[in-house]
Amino acid sequence: MKLEGIHHITAITADAQRNVDFYAGVLGLRLVKKSVNQDYTSVYHLFYADENGDPGSDITFFEYPGVNRGRPGAGMVHRIVWRLAGSEALDFWESRLADHGSEPHRLPDSVVFDDPEGLTHELRVVEVPDEPLIANHPEIPAELALQGFHAARAYAADPERSRALLEDTLGFAPPVEVGPGGTILSREIRGERRGSFYLYEPPPAAPPLQGAGSVHHIAWAAPPEEIEAWQQRVAAAGARPTPIIDRHYFRSVYFREPSGVLFEIATIGPGFTVDEPPEHLGEKLSLTPKFERLRDQIEPTLTPLRNPRESWAPR
Ligand code: ZN
């Protein structure tokens, strides 16, 4: 039983329209699902991914309109690393991000920047055997586009506490020391088809604060038939997982790993085409069967969103 790297990463936004404008309009991801928070249906849950809505490329946001900025600290993912194919993509993104008001920071193999709410991303040139997960965008040539997640970086005060759960229970590789002075620990998690890295580094002094621009949780991908076994394995390790929860697009188990980061294991499939055809993903408000009968009450409470795709010329 192996986890297939990162499934999705969920963060918080205070402004859904600005979020769509940045992730779909600037970064070129596809808005593949426009739904509501299943625990709080008056706020959006937005999902961006590659053209097919594949796990491994899916960043999602809960909207809490007007919520204060968060502050990453111990027990939180604070940087999301995406794959690029080559160094010409670094030039492209450095220039594109600057043109759109970000302040990209160029490193030898990557470009680092914050989204409009302070969530840090890194676009990194990597060589991996995994299939590139790319979305279409008229201003972004496919060979320069984001290719899916590569890694997530988290702050941990005492990363040793997480070792047993990560390595013995979840199947992460032993850590490799990277970064200045070996202060960053990088572990690979690799399945049959995809892999990702999970990194720990020492936290800043200030305590963490959930809010706009902060990561809420990270999900790891599992084959659908293995979710029950994962739930039992995590429970046997004493990590107190939730029961399996049906999220309609996948089934999920949640638990907090010992360094404090909220983990989810989510199934690969049934996926975002379960309630919309592939060519129309994300265009209308999707409600799960439980909430569909409340559509007339839910939809009017949500601010209409402009999707940059609506303005694209027919192809
Ligand atoms: Zn999730």
Image (spheres, helix red, strand yellow):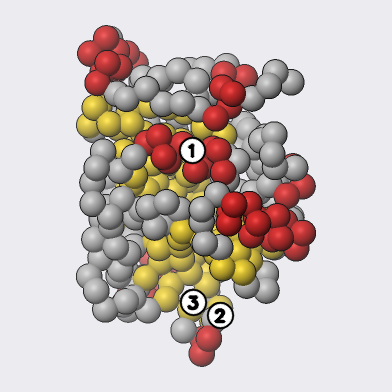
Residue 134 visible in this rendered orientation of the protein? yes
Q: Position of residue 50 (x, y in %)?
A: 61, 38
Which sits earlier in the primary sequence, circle 3 or circle 1?
1
Residue 86 visible in this rendered orientation of the protein? no
Q: Residue at x 32, y 76 (%)?
A: 204
**Residue situated furthest bottom in the rendering:** 181
In this image, 308 relative to 210: left or right? right
Which secondary structure, mark 2?
strand
Separation of residues labelled 2 and 1 (CA atoms): 34 Å
Q: Position of residue 239 (x, y in %)?
A: 29, 58
Separation of residues labelled 2 and 3 (CA atoms): 6 Å
Tag 2 residue: 178
In this image, 72 relative to 306: left or right? left
Which secondary structure, mark 3?
strand
Q: Nearer the viewer, residue 105 or 231?
A: 105
The image quadrant where one finds the C terminus is top right
Q: Residue at x 69, y 61 (%)?
A: 90
